[in-house]
Image: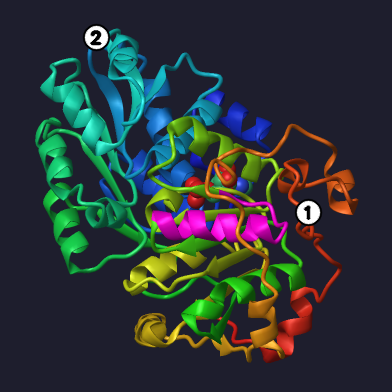
């Protein structure tokens, strides 16, 4: 099947051609015809499956075919997203796919001055992508209303629930006209989310690409049983031994994320943290550095990592194991995308073993347990001191020497600051294939 089979309006076909998209992904194949026919949709899919285009393309098609003027202070398509990063990404997708349409796309999220957003919205917009809290603020200030909404999209509904947005979301939905099309997406579909979907949707078509509670295909899962106090040394050892394109390292807390970044910096390994205590500018800079390959390692909390879409994510490392197994599915769903094999590595301490069990029960898979490296005690003893707390992890890397040069011996960011710690040199190592015999494949 090809995109041209959907019969999209010409400007959309043009944009898809410009992006060199030819074949729709499975979620797109299933969802697009239903959405084009005006049906409500319940989509069970993770980031990385192409779900954004699954709702953006048919929504844009509607705008392209019915080019009425957007009334002031409202929008025609409203997308709710749990995080600002995801909101920014979704808006960018709408702009990309809608680049040949006369289209006004805006985002609103917290952490940036509200008055600028108010000004931007006063003329009305075609597409608004918003996080629930900030949108409610705008509605409360009567700076915006939702009476013009024709299409309502709720993206990552399970995350919105986890992040405590359930009441804001319900309030927002109650302000949207009943006569609307609703597209509801969630990576997992526990009972509460299914209840919410039932409340918001009318006679929906349900499509699912990763059956709920299973992990994505093509992800190799490995786990180490390790003491909490040894985790940092083990992480450093793993990072030196793996061929890493780009890895997301998950910690449970913001403090934990900063601590990992400082410890890695001490060992001469560049990474950046992304979490809720960082300013919007820091988060954007970190994400940008990660996307363009300036930095290979991003250390994130679950909340900050929501919706981050970066291609070529070779590894997800669980420095701490989530106590909610769905969260694990979300985390590792970030690797192994676009037909590439991904590796998920979990560092499991004694008190996290029960979390791993719960994950294995939910996903009906088992991680390969990898023995600790020989000389673990020595690795712990030899672990260099963490870099000093201030600013080290918050600053994006220096603007750029070419990447190869850096890898061959250009000074790292920490090196440039006079730290004589050993440098991180990605070595030529075992390819993924080298593990093939030993690993548990999922899917
Ligand atoms: P999403 O799951 O919406 O975050 O999309 C994941 C990635 O796949 C994004 O970088 C999209 O640009 C890309 N993508 C989506 N649909 C297609 C497609 N049909 N062909 C190629 N790439 C796609």
Query: Which residue in the protein does label 1 denote?
Result: 420
Magenta: predominant secondary structure element? Answer: helix
Residues 215 and 149: in front is: 215
Quick one: SS at disc 1?
Answer: loop
Q: Nearer the viewer, mark 1 or mark 2?
A: 1
Residue 244 in percent (x, y) is at 72, 63
Task: Indicate left or right for 97 with 45 as reference.
Answer: right
Residues 329 and 126: in front is: 329
Q: Residue at x 27, y 65 (%)?
A: 189
Residue 67 in percent (x, y) is at 37, 15
Q: Residue at x 68, y 66 (%)?
A: 384
Give the magenta-colored segment's residue range: 254-272
Task: Indicate left or right for 180 with 339 as reference.
Answer: left
Residue 290 in percent (x, y) is at 63, 45
Q: CA separation, marks 1 and 2? A: 58 Å
The crowd level at tag 2 (other Cα within 10 Å; few <14, some 14-19, many 20+) is some
Membership of 263 in magenta stretch: yes
Against 148, residue 418 (above or below) is below
Membership of 119 in magenta stretch: no
Quick one: SS at disc 2?
Answer: loop
The crowd level at tag 1 (other Cα within 10 Å; few <14, some 14-19, many 20+) is few
Quarter of the image where one finds residue 175? top left
Visible residue check, residue 8: no
Badge number at residue 89? none
Visible residue check, residue 95: yes
- Lower sequence index among marks 1 and 2: 2
Against 164, residue 376 (above or below) is below
Residues 215 and 278: in front is: 278
Q: Residue at x 21, y 60 (%)?
A: 193
Callout 2: CB less than 8 Å from ligand 1: no
Query: Which residue in the protein does label 2 denote?
Result: 72
């Amino acid at each position: 099947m090809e995109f041209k089979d959907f019969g999209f309006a010409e400007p959309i076909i043009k944009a898809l051609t410009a992006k060199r998209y030819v074949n729709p992904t499975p979620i797109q194949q299933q969802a697009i015809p239903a959405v084009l026919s005006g049906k409500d949709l319940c989509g069970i899919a993770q980031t990385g499956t192409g779900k954004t285009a699954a709702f953006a393309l048919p929504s844009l098609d509607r705008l392209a075919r019915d080019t009425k003027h957007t009334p002031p202070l409202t929008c025609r398509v409203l997308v709710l997203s749990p995080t600002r990063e995801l909101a920014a990404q979704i808006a960018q997708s709408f702009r990309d796919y809608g680049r040949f349409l006369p289209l006004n796309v805006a985002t609103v999220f917290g952490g940036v001055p509200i008055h600028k957003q108010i000004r931007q919205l006063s003329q009305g917009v075609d597409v608004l992508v918003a996080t629930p809290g900030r949108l409610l603020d705008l509605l409360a200030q009567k700076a915006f209303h939702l009476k013009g909404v024709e299409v309502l999209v709720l993206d990552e509904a399970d995350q919105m629930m986890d992040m405590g947005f359930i009441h804001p979301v319900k309030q927002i939905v109650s302000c949207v006209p009943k006569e609307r099309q609703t597209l509801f997406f969630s990576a997992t579909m526990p009972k509460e989310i299914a209840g919410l979907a039932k409340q918001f949707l009318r006679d929906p078509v349900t499509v699912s690409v990763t059956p709920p509670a299973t992990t994505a295909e093509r992800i190799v899962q490995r786990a180490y049983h390790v003491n909490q106090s040894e985790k940092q040394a083990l992480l450093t050892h793993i990072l030196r031994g793996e061929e890493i394109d780009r890895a997301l390292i998950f910690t449970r807390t913001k403090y934990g994320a900063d601590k990992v970044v400082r410890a890695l910096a001490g060992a001469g390994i560049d990474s950046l943290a992304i979490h809720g205590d960082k300013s919007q500018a820091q988060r954007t800079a970190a994400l940008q550095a990660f996307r363009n390959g300036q930095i290979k390692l991003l250390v994130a909390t679950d909340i900050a990592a929501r919706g981050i879409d970066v291609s070529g994510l070779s590894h997800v490392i669980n420095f701490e194991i989530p106590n909610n197994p769905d969260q694990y599915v979300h985390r590792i769903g970030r690797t192994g995308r676009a037909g590439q094999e991904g590796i998920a590595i979990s560092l499991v301490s004694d008190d996290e073993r029960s979390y791993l069990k719960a994950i294995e029960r939910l996903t009906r898979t088992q991680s390969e347990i990898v023995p600790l490296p020989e000389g673990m005690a020595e690795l712990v003893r030899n672990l260099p001191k963490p870099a000093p707390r201030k600013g080290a992890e918050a600053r994006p890397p220096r603007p750029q020497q070419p990447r190869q040069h850096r890898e061959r011996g250009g000074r790292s960011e920490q090196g440039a600051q006079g730290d004589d710690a050993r440098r991180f040199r990605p070595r030529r190592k075992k390819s993924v294939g080298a593990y093939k015999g030993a690993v548990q494949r999922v899917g």
